[in-house]
């Protein structure tokens, strides 16, 4: 019994692999992580598993069919959990090509490799095999203020190159089930936050910028609404679907926690004021040169994201009804843990802010 996890060195994937070995129900089942280690993939996220015979990290590309075939033949996994993707909407606006390649072509390659492997399995192993596709609420498009939350039957209306590429991958997964009978599961989740979140995304970017006295760039009026879920809860939901989800079904995963971006940024600032006061740390504003008293002073409204979706909301009743899953964290407990994690892991933050990171920040924010 082994799992093949793609993208397991990224934010959610690494949390999933670490939680997998910590969760008693998984009984230490071995994991093979396949990850290209792009800018977003970091083997340091999995450092706690170094030397642990139950875990193997393979650096490689999901578009490399020969490599995927070889891994399937060697490790004989009973499931593939597919996280690998280009995941950042702003990057997809600046350079959509990588999103089409990894998210569409990569998912296609994995599906074909999985189909060949699964077709040749003995009856019992064939019946037990699962291809779990990890996707996003962004495929459903944008909601108005009074609209009902996304259910699993909401029409697909992706608006960004990222969400279009994820929508395409969802459709491929669906088609491989309906046409070839591949035993697939798809989960569509809302915005995650927590440890190992790369600081290009809203919450970690705000934490690291605030501590450095840099502007906190809020796109447009900051009233765009997202549903936020602590990453550990996403991992437990995936384990629940993998264990008990019905084949070919889609499960929405969410935190029942809709908040406008500006409120999120103020919450992060207030927690930093409490846990790491700017005056005590001697934080100086990088733009005014003045000492910072309250981190919220650094909030700066900047040009909006093109095609910015206004609101996402997830109706997560199906996964609760069928599998008994609900998030364990509230936003208050999750965001406090997250801020504390970043304060305790300054070395990790410093190491991921490489030259390539600084180039991206210049590309995305210089013209705003
Ligand atoms: P991430 O960008 O942090 O990690 C992606 C990982 O995939 C990285 O480790 C990267 O090296 C790897 N990767 C990229 N291209 C690859 C390739 N061609 N071959 C092999 N590995 C490759 O992303 P994340 O936030 O952890 O998201 C993981 C998955 O969850 C994605 O599929 C994303 O669409 C989905 N998702 C994310 C969120 C969120 O809030 N972050 C919410 C819902 C769904
Ligand atoms: O909804 C799930 C999705 O959530 C995932 O599928 C994506 O992989 C993940 O990146 C995330 O997408 P978002 O675009 O919602 O996340 P991001 O953190 O980039 O932005 C969250 C909100 O904050 C969004 O409305 C844009 C805004 N924002 C973001 C950044 C980086 C800002 O206002 N300022 C910023 O600097």
Image (tube, grey):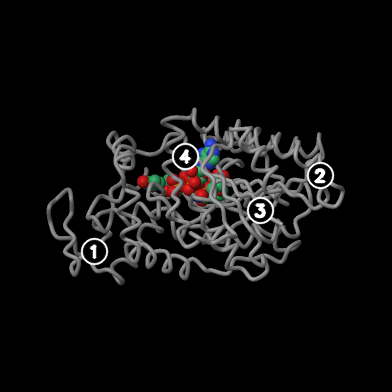
Q: Secondary structure at mark 1?
A: loop
Look at 64% across and 57% down and name the residue there: 238
Decide: few, some or many residues near mark 1? Use Cα within 10 Å; few <14, some 14-19, many ≥20. some
Q: Position of residue 113 (x, y in %)?
A: 70, 36
| Spatial CA span between label 4 and label 1 | 30 Å
Residue 273: percent from left, percent from top:
28, 68
Which residue is the site of mark 4? 89
Q: Earlier in the sequence, mark 4 or mark 1?
A: 4
Residue 269 visible from this viewpoint:
yes
x and y percent of residue 23 in the render?
61, 68
- Dot 2 or dot 4, earlier in sequence: 4
Q: Is residue 326 above or below residue 75?
A: below
Q: CA distance from mark 2 to mark 3?
A: 15 Å
The secondary element bearing badge 2 is classed as loop
Contact between labelled residues 4 and 2, with CB atoms less than 8 Å apart = no
Say whether mark 4 is within 8 Å of ligand 2: yes
- Real-space CA distance between mark 1 and mark 3, rounded to the nearest whole angstrom: 46 Å
Q: Which residue is mark 3?
A: 3
Residue neighbourhood size for the residue with mark 4, other residues' Cα within 10 Å, grouped as few (<14), some (14–19), many (≥20)? some
Counting residues from the N terminus, which is met first, the one under dot 1 or under dot 2? Answer: 2
> Which residue in the protein does label 2 denote?
121
Quadrant including the C terminus: top left
């Amino acid at each position: 019994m082994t799992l093949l996890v793609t993208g397991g060195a990224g934010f959610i994937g690494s949390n999933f692999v670490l939680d997998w070995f910590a969760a008693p129900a998984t009984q230490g089942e071995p994991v093979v992580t396949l990850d290209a280690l792009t800018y977003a993939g970091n083997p340091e996220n999995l450092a706690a598993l170094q030397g642990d015979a139950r875990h193997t990290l393979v650096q490689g590309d999901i578009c490399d069919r020969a490599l995927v075939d070889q891994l399937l033949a060697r490790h004989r996994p009973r499931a593939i959990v597919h996280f690998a993707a280009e995941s950042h909407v702003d990057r997809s606006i600046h350079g959509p090509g990588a999103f089409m390649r990894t998210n569409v072509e990569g998912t296609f390659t994995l599906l074909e490799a999985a189909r060949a492997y699964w077709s040749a399995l003995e009856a019992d192993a064939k019946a037990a095999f699962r291809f779990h596709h990890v996707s996003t609420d962004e495929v459903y498009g944008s909601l108005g203020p009074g609209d009902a939350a996304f259910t699993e039957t909401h029409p697909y209306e992706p608006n960004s190159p990222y969400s279009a590429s994820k929508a395409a991958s969802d459709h491929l997964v669906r088609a491989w089930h309906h046409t070839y009978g591949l035993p697939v599961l798809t989960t569509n989740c809302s915005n995650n936050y927590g440890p190992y979140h790369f600081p290009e995304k809203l919450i970690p970017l705000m934490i690291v910028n605030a501590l450095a006295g840099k502007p906190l760039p809020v796109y447009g009026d900051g009233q765009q609404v997202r549903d936020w879920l602590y990453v550990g809860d996403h991992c437990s939901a995936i384990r629940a679907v993998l264990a008990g989800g019905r084949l070919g079904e889609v499960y929405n995963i969410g935190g029942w926690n809709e908040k406008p971006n500006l409120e999120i940024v103020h919450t992060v600032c207030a927690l930093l004021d409490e846990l790491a006061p700017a005056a005590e740390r001697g934080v100086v504003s990088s733009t005014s040169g003045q000492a910072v008293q309250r981190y919220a002073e650094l909030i700066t409204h900047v040009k909006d994201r093109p095609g910015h979706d206004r609101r996402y909301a997830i109706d997560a009743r199906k996964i609760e009804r069928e599998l008994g899953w609900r998030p364990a964290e509230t936003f208050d407990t999750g965001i406090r843990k997250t801020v504390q994690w970043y304060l305790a892991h300054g070395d990790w933050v410093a190491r991921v802010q490489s030259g390539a990171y600084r180039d991206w920040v210049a590309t995305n924010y210089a013209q705003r």
